[in-house]
Amino acid sequence: MKPDVWHIGNHELTSRFFIGTGLFPSPYVQREAIEASGAEVLTFAIRRINLEATEDDSILQHLQGKSYQYLPNTSGASTAEEAVRIARLARASGLSDWIKVEISANDRTLLPDPIETLKATEILVKEGFTVLPYTSDDPVICKRLEEAGAAAVMPGAAPIGTGLGILNPYNLGLIVEEAKVPIIVDAGLGSVSDVTQAMELGVAGVLMNTPVAKAKDPAGMARAMRLGIEAGRLAYLSGRISKKRYASASSGYEEFKLK
Amino acid sequence: MGERIVIMGGGIIGLSCAFELRSRGHQVTVLEISSCGGQASGAAAGMLAPFSENVEGPDDFFRLCAQSLRLYPAFTDRVKQVSDLPFEYTESGSMYIAYHDADILALEGRLRWQREHGSSGSLLQGEEVFRLEPKLSGKVRAALYTPEESHLYAPHYVKALEHACRLMGVHIHEHLEQVAIKDWQSSVVLEAADLSVFEGDRLVVCSGAWAQQLEAAFGIRIPVYPIRGQICAYETEEKPVHHMVFCNQGYLVAKENNTLVCGASEDVAGFETTVTEKGIERLRKWNKQAFPFLETWTPFHKWAGLRPSTQDGFPLLGALAQSGRVVMGVGHYRNGILLSPVTAQLVADSVEGKKMPDFMQAFVPERFS
């Protein structure tokens, strides 16, 4: 069987798990969990990083010696202008030319501002970044972001850190159907079943931080999530049965009828 | 007469528990494999900062930390009174600084819940920041100011606590090298490397990063890992920094003894407590961004301690379900000094069979087993 690889831009990926580096109880647990996740892409907030000495940053220093693709994010930005400003800082520091555009208008919901997100995406694509915008689960805005040149689009399942799971699977299904770039579910996932559901809907990958970092055993949960992603992906590829209203015996009743 | 209590560990937590239990009339023995306060306790910068250390939300650990801060003034007064040894306790307040406009949203969110939980803090921007800390870099855009936070001089606090314990009649045995648990179910019997035996009615485990070695003895998982924390200090003539200053990379605090302490550079290095050049350089790379005058300063003192971190970041606190004879107080990670009064109170309450507050559910020692 040919390996189930996928691409963002020209970058080939095997793992479908993007993991956030924040919130872990200690550097030791963080390292164990990231390893258990099998993730190839790590994300973190640019504002939390010491950009003048990234190799000595309090988070990134613990990840040295492994080759990860970094996906810095613009979390905390409330305008396209601020997001673009810190994206440029991140690239200039040599971290990565991948950028997750994350623009929130409100500190209570942290829901993405789709208008500013689209503006920032347009600007950063023109500047040659590989742009992965985090946005709401609206099929139209997701399409618009793709048309603006996003390398992948990342709709949220629910507000960041809530663990509420996929609030609108119908929308997410539509987004996947319409998309020509990878769709990655970002934010709001809580459990392995949420993750598996996302993968069954046909998304290319998921991004998580809180459900792993705040678990009682983060490394154990990272492994569980990894297996959930694999199971959901395989189920999507294998094709689930259609739903029926009434029972149909698996060993056909008709065959046993005396004729 | 009280009960006979044996405490494993003569760090800040063990000594605080000994002080509290002895104050309540129990007979207390402390067993220490090296010397009291010789590990993380003596290495700590003494930051009493539940708001700056817990930025995500008012979880059970934050509640524990905040309660401890409230207990602090009365607890340290008692320690000072009994020991007659002074130690610095400074109600300086803290500033959590930020360099980007993108930080402001997060600081606002933090301030919103912290103000509902005992902070009278405010978000400072522009000139307000520099009015409080004139030497901060002009690149600082905003700061969360929390007046409630304070700091103390940990090595002196630990010494005073140890001295108070001795004066009150706590038996402290140091340099035992190794202490094995011989019995903990029908009675408490421990044996040191030199074969001396210690007996009691109750056992309190306060052995910090070494607690994991007791997994086999109790038959439970004790996922406590040592995280090395490296700190450096500068000599100063007058206080160049007036508050505890935190940023996402670490903290700076000026002490009464004319030093400016900068911490902490964390790494995973087993039980190694050596100081590394890389560890200290990391501190020097960010601290000059916060305070440009540090560019030309060289630390005169560098040290390291092992912080006992746990798998979920919460301590293991309270009596074992299998035998109420054993009470755990381990895994305080970066907050051992802060958590000294509340741990002493909860451990003593637990020994005496008192009802535990609801938030203690999050710290049940067997939760990993």
Image (cartoon, coloured by chain):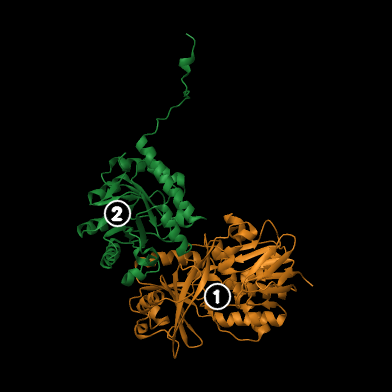
Chain colours: A green, B orange
Residue A9 bears which disc, if any?
none
Looking at the picture, which amino acid does disc 2 mark?
A: Leu
Residue B100 visible here: no
Task: Using the image as rendered, state which of residue B133 and residue B302 is in the foreground.
Answer: B302
Identify the image quadrant of residue A69: bottom left
**Does residue A168 appear left or right of residue B76 in this picture?**
left
Secondary structure under tag 1 reads loop
Question: Which of the image's four quarters has the N terminus of chain B?
Answer: bottom right
Identify the image quadrant of residue A32: bottom left
Task: Using the image as rendered, state which of residue A150 and residue B155 is in the foreground.
Answer: B155
Residue at position x 45%, y 90% in the image: B238
Q: What is the x, y in percent for residue B245?
A: 44, 77
Q: What is the x, y in percent for residue B302?
A: 45, 81
**Does residue B1 appear left or right of residue B207 in this picture?**
right
Looking at the picture, which amino acid does disc 1 mark?
A: Gln
Residue B39 bears which disc, if any?
1
Q: What is the x, y in percent for residue A34?
A: 41, 57
Residue A132 bears which disc, if any?
2
Q: Mark 1 lies on which chain?
A: B
Secondary structure under tag 2 reads strand
Above or below residue B208? Residue B262 is: below
Residue A172 visible here: yes
Q: Which chain carries label 2?
A: A
Using the numbered discs, state the Cα–Cα distance from disc 2 to disc 1 in whole angstroms. Answer: 46 Å
Residue that lies at the very extreme toward the front in this rendered image: B194
Above or below residue A232? Residue B56 is: below
Point out the frontmost of discs 2 and 1: 1
Task: Using the image as rendered, state which of residue B75 and residue B9 is in the foreground.
Answer: B9
Residue that lies at the very extreme toward the bottom in this rendered image: B237
Above or below residue B103? Residue A69 is: above
